[in-house]
Image (cartoon, grey):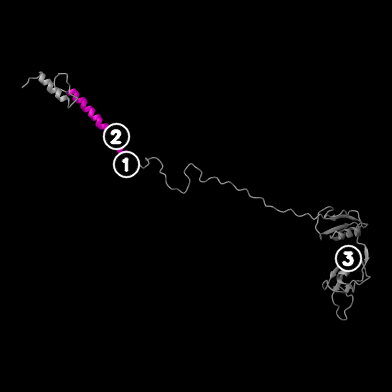
Amino acid sequence: MVAPGTVAGDEAVGGMTDGNTGLRTDGASGDAGPDRLTLALGGGLSVALLAAIGATGGWLLAGEGAEPTGRPVAGATTGAPTGSPSAAPSRATPTAPRSTSPTRSTGLTVPPLIGTDFAEARDELRERRLGWRLVFGSGTGRTVTRTSPAVGAEVRPGTTVHLYVDGPAPASTVPDVVGEECDDAADELVDEGFYPRYRSGRRGVVTRQEPAGDAAGNWNDPVAIWCGVAAPGSPTASPVP
């Protein structure tokens, strides 16, 4: 048996260093207390590091494909994400202004009639295919003092123009129109300043009238006429019913 401290003992110790590098080989006592502590601490740190790496790897494997807690999970929504407009701002389509076709100009205007004789003013309106209405006043004279519509106003054919005359309606004699065609009789009455009143239509021959022909009257007075086939024994003139 070899005593401690011999060369054989050192070789035995040196043989053990191949299996454990933590043992001392400097020929000192075989007590390896401090080295064992270092080994234990190093091993503990290694285990702790491996445990941490394993835990991290397990967390990564377990959490793969999932979002960490605390972040919004994407999903199907009917609205836009929070913080963005709910919809793209719609551009207001401007409303097309309504196109109103301008009134076609007739080129017809009230002629300058102020200061003219009312009969001449009436004839000029008649030539322009305009109607007229004589409005007599209480002054003197036959001149037109104003018109309505005003002189120069644009009018349509058939528009009635009121002629305001300074003086009263002058006297006129009622023409005899019995036996004439209804249209011709009406024109003759108008020429003499009267207004025809149709009692039985506007077609045919005048069978009677009221007032009778050659009666005294004034401008603007109405004269009633009956047009058509005369009934046997009917008078040529009769009072207006």
Q: Which residue is mark 3?
A: 190
Q: Residues within 10 Å of mark 1 (few under 14, many from 20)?
A: few
Residue 168 placement: quadrant = bottom right
Q: Nearer the viewer, residue 189 or 173?
A: 189
Residue at 88% of width from left, 69% of height from top?
A: 184
Residue 134 visible in the snapshot: no
Q: Amino acid at mark 3?
A: Val
Looking at the rendered structure, which numbered label has been put on residue 62? Answer: 1
Whole-percent x, y for residue 53 in the image? 29, 34
Whole-percent x, y for residue 17 in the image? 17, 24
Figure check: 17 above or below 139 = above
Q: Which residues are magenta?
A: 33-62
Residue at 86% of width from left, 71% of height from top?
A: 182
- The secondary structure that most of the magenta stretch takes on is helix
Residue at 34% of width from left, 41% of height from top?
A: 63
Q: CA gap, disc 3 to disc 2?
A: 123 Å
Looking at the rendered structure, which numbered label has been put on residue 53? Answer: 2
In this rendering, position of residue 188 left or right of residue 28: right
Image quarter in which the N terminus is found: top left
Q: Are marks 3 and 1 in contact (CB under 8 Å)?
A: no
Q: Amino acid at mark 2?
A: Ile
Q: Is residue 44 magenta?
A: yes
Element assignment for label 2: helix
Q: Are marks 2 and 1 in contact (CB under 8 Å)?
A: no
Element assignment for label 1: helix
